[in-house]
Image: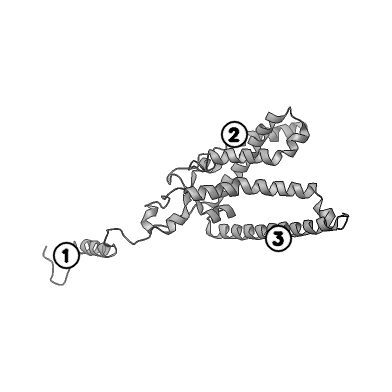
Amino acid sequence: MDLSPDQPPAEAWQQARLISGNDTCTSSGACKERPWPLKVLRSSQADAARLDDELIVLLHEQFMRLFSYFKPGDVAALEPELNGVLMLLIFAFTVWRGKATPGSQLLNLRYRNEYAMQQQPPQACGSTGVEGPALGLTQRVMFGLGYVLLPWVWSRVSRAAQQWEWEDRISGRSSHQQSGLSSLRIWHVLQGLERMYKVASLSNLVAFLHHGTHRSLLERLVGARLVYQQPHMTRVISFEYLNRQLVWQELSEGLLF
């Protein structure tokens, strides 16, 4: 069938699409079109943090059993150091080796260097949007300082404040006026730092609920973002044991009462 002079051929729309696609590409051949925005479930990130906390509690109970034959006073005095060693071991075998925390791995999540991704073109995210480099050496060191060192320092300072009775000195119960003034200054600094941390954590929580990135203040400062490790993989965690445990617990409580 012959086409009229004013009617374009059947392949004209394909040629026009190819030409328009070539116009949107750069001289290197990479297209400027931005991939789909990456959306990681907030519930998955929150569940990963909860699983990490539960794992730390279980490991802490097992770890403290090693010191069951020591004097209770000595173990209590060294509890911040023991917790620091435990957190250091968890960090050394996970984030320091380029992996995510155990809870994040169970939920198919990993850490991505978000600072490096901001300096790269959109095509670096790949077709799925989860591609990207892992955390660099500086980021892992900073993450370790905030994950291990800062909690230990704060715990040790809090214990020192209770041991030296800074609150009693501030209220005027101590007879040493000079030491009371020094304690007052240190106490005010600690209280100010604690308030700033709480305000920053609250702001980060609001930003996390709005944007869905950086569930903790440490991750935001370091530039570590949780993304899917495998985009087409479901969550690895299984709730069969948990459901069975809940059923047996309800049955046992019903039989007792």
**Callout 1 environment at 10 Å: few (<14), some (14 to 19), or many (20+)?**
few
- The residues bearing labels 2 and 3 have C-alpha atoms spaced at a distance of 45 Å
Query: Residue 35: horizontal and vertical position, in percent?
Result: 38, 57
Residue lying farthest left?
2
Residue 253: which disc?
A: none
Dividing the picture into quadrants, the one containing residue 181 is bottom right
Q: Which amino acid type is marked by label 1?
A: Pro
What is the secondary structure assignment of the residue under circle 3? Answer: helix
Residue ID for mark 2: 241
Where is mark 1, residue-wise?
Answer: 9
Looking at the image, which residue is at 57% across and 39% down? 90
Q: Distance from label 1 to label 2 (Cα)? A: 64 Å
Q: Determine which quarter of the picture holds residue 201.
A: bottom right
Give the amino acid type for the residue marked by disc 3 in the picture.
Gly
Residue 192 appears in the rendering: yes
The amino acid pointed to by label 2 is: Tyr
User: Between residues 44 and 76, which one lies in front from this camera angle?
Assistant: 76
Figure check: 50 above or below 73:
below
Q: Residue at x 86, y 55 (%)?
A: 176
Q: Between 25 and 256, which is closer to the camera in this rendering?
A: 25
Q: Nearer the viewer, mark 1 or mark 2?
A: 2
Mark found first going from the N terminus, 1 or 2: 1
Determine the residue located farthest toward the bottom in the rendered image. Answer: 6
Residues at circles 1 and 2 in contact by the CB criterion of under 8 Å: no
Label number found at residue 192: 3
